[in-house]
Amino acid sequence: MSDKQYDLVVIGGGPGGYVAAIRAAQLGMKTACVEGRGALGGTCLNVGCIPSKALLQSSEKFADASKHFAEHGIQVEGLKLDLAAMMSRKDKVVKGLTDGIEFLFKKNKIDYVKGWGSIPAVGSVKVKLDDGGEETLSAKKILIATGSESTPLPGVATDEKQIVTSTGALALDKLPGSLVVIGAGVIGLEMGSVWSRLGAEVTVVEFLDRILPGMDGEIGKQTQRVLGKQGLNFKLGTKVTGAKNGKDGVTLTLEPAKGGDVEELKADVVLVAIGRRPFTEGLGLKELGVAMNNRGFIEVDGNFQTSVEGIYAIGDCIPGPMLAHKAEEDGVVAAERMAGQKSHVDYNLVPGVVYTWPEVAGVGKTEEQLKEAGVDYKVGKFPFMANSRARAVGDTDGVVKVLADKRTDKVLGVHILGPLAGDILAECVAVMEFGGTAEDIARTCHSHPSMGESVKEAAMAADGRAIHI
Ligand code: FAD
Ligand code: NAD
């Protein structure tokens, strides 16, 4: 017999799971959340978004002090990296936030069950408790929010010391002389930036002939140029076929993606960042008959219900962008739908941000996607070089690109490389949610001087009437 009865048991305490638990509790459901890693917040708070942004911030300050303070008339002598202090600040930021979620659970009367969950039968969650022993929870509904893990690369086994995933790259105890990053995606560019700014020689090896696949191609090219200027080396159209660990580092074997001569590349540390895959191990989904697609993602309907009644799934373990804010939206809507509400997630308007400096941000369709779909569109662009705030700050790299329907003027996509791109994109997401036009942005009063004025000017440029270019 099950000892505790719940309306909802959530398995996984990441941004999908913890947000769903809080929303469900707000809606009156008796809720428990099972989490095995010893802290709430999932990948995002523990080994993802937050620690990476803490290190991006610290490393940016270091790079500013060593390379850019002088142009502001500030001389720095005896600048030194204290990596241990930088890492402990990051750990403190993480701890503060994960503890904060525990507080929110208490406030919302959610039971936090510490251990690894499995689903022996519909309506039942068995937990292997972190402190030993087992507990079985009885649940009217079960929500799987078990997230994702780093995709392994055959022939390049990770040990989290010399050959690392993002988790190891967030916790190196020594500055590597050289770092090879496999994969020029989001993790590769963010973590590559961190270690390059701190002084490592960083080479990014990418299978495709471009960086940041999925983002607008022109913005990707400009990003590569800007990051190249900062010191990142790129080897595109190249695949890694093997790795050998040695006393003085790792030797990788590389080949052109299209075939050709093999070459070797040595590095003190190698980061494998070729994507993430859903994590559903140990849940017992096959035995239950929960349908998954050929890449292991759990299939769900519009209510986030799986093929088995009473079992739901959200976040990184279902198809869609593997992003924290998308997992949160899933979590809110899944809980609201369980409570009979009709809310939904607009997957066409999930913004994506790469927190390099300058940042890369995009929402909606890329130019490539519009071309492929045969949409008649117009483009408005505005460079940060012509933005007075960017000039005053000294951050002039990048551009805002607004894509709008040629006939209706409706905004179809916005892509930005620039300072605070992720933050200034938010207004574009809101405009697009309301089905707004480039003219709506162009006629909105933006404060001066601000980076956001570049969005306004790009929207005006879509109508051939930008003022400052
Ligand atoms: P997760 O956050 O992965 O949480 C799942 C949780 O479930 C984990 O804590 C896990 O321990 C637990 N779990 C799994 N199985 C069980 C089980 N059987 N029983 C109990 N518990 C279980 N996204 C962004 O939007 N912005 C960013 O800046 C960003 N930066 C990132 C940086 C890095 C280095 C990485 C790796 C990812 C980053 N992401 C970012 C992606 C983001 O972290 C994920 O999209 C997000 O965490 C997904 O949330 P989730 O709740 O679906 O899963
Ligand atoms: P990604 O999908 O962003 O990039 C992986 C890159 O590796 C791609 O460019 C791909 O072409 C390349 N690749 C694949 N196989 C390869 C191979 N064998 N050799 C060389 N290159 C290869 O994946 P990621 O950077 O690992 O990030 C994983 C997930 O985490 C992403 O879905 C991302 O959304 C999320 N994330 C988000 C943020 C953010 O929002 N700022 C930050 C970090 C991670």
Image: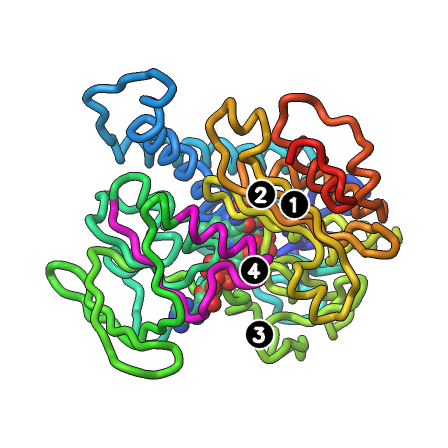
Residue 15: x %, y % from top left: 60, 47
Tell me the quarter of the image containing the C terminus.
Answer: top right
Label 2 beta carbon less than 8 Å to ligand 2: no
Say if the magenta span includes residue 364: no
Report the residue marked by disc 4: 217
Whole-percent x and y of residue 27? 81, 43
Highlighted magenta segment, given as a residue range: 200-227
Residue in the image at 39% along x and 54% along y = 166
Residue positioned 62% across, 43% down in the render: 400
User: What separation in Å lies between label 4 and label 2 (alpha carbons)?
Assistant: 13 Å
Q: Amino acid at mark 4?
A: Gly
Regarding mark 3 in the picture, which secondary structure is present there? Answer: loop
Spatial separation of the CA atoms under disc 3 and disc 2: 38 Å
Looking at the figure, which quarter contains the N terminus? bottom right
- Choose mark 3 or mark 2, whichever is in front: 2
Mark 1–mark 2 CB contact (< 8 Å): yes
Q: Are marks 4 and 1 in contact (CB under 8 Å)?
A: no
Residue 164, picture quadrant: bottom left
Are discs 1 and 3 less than 8 Å apart at CB?
A: no
Dot 2 corresponds to which residue?
399
Alpha-carbon span between mark 1 and mark 3: 40 Å
The residue sitting at 25% across, 41% down in the picture is 199
Which residue position is annotated with label 1?
Answer: 381
Task: Determine crowd level at label 1: few under 14, some 14-19, many 20+ residues with C-alpha closer than 10 A.
Answer: many
Instruction: Answer with left or right where residue 153 lies relative to residue 354.
Output: left
In the rendered image of this protein, does residue 260 appear above or below residue 339? Answer: below
- Colour logic: rainbow
Asked if one can make out residue 218 in the rendered structure from this viewpoint, the answer is yes
In terms of sequence position, does the residue under pointer 1 or pointer 2 come before the other?
1
Residue located at (34% from left, 64% from top): 235
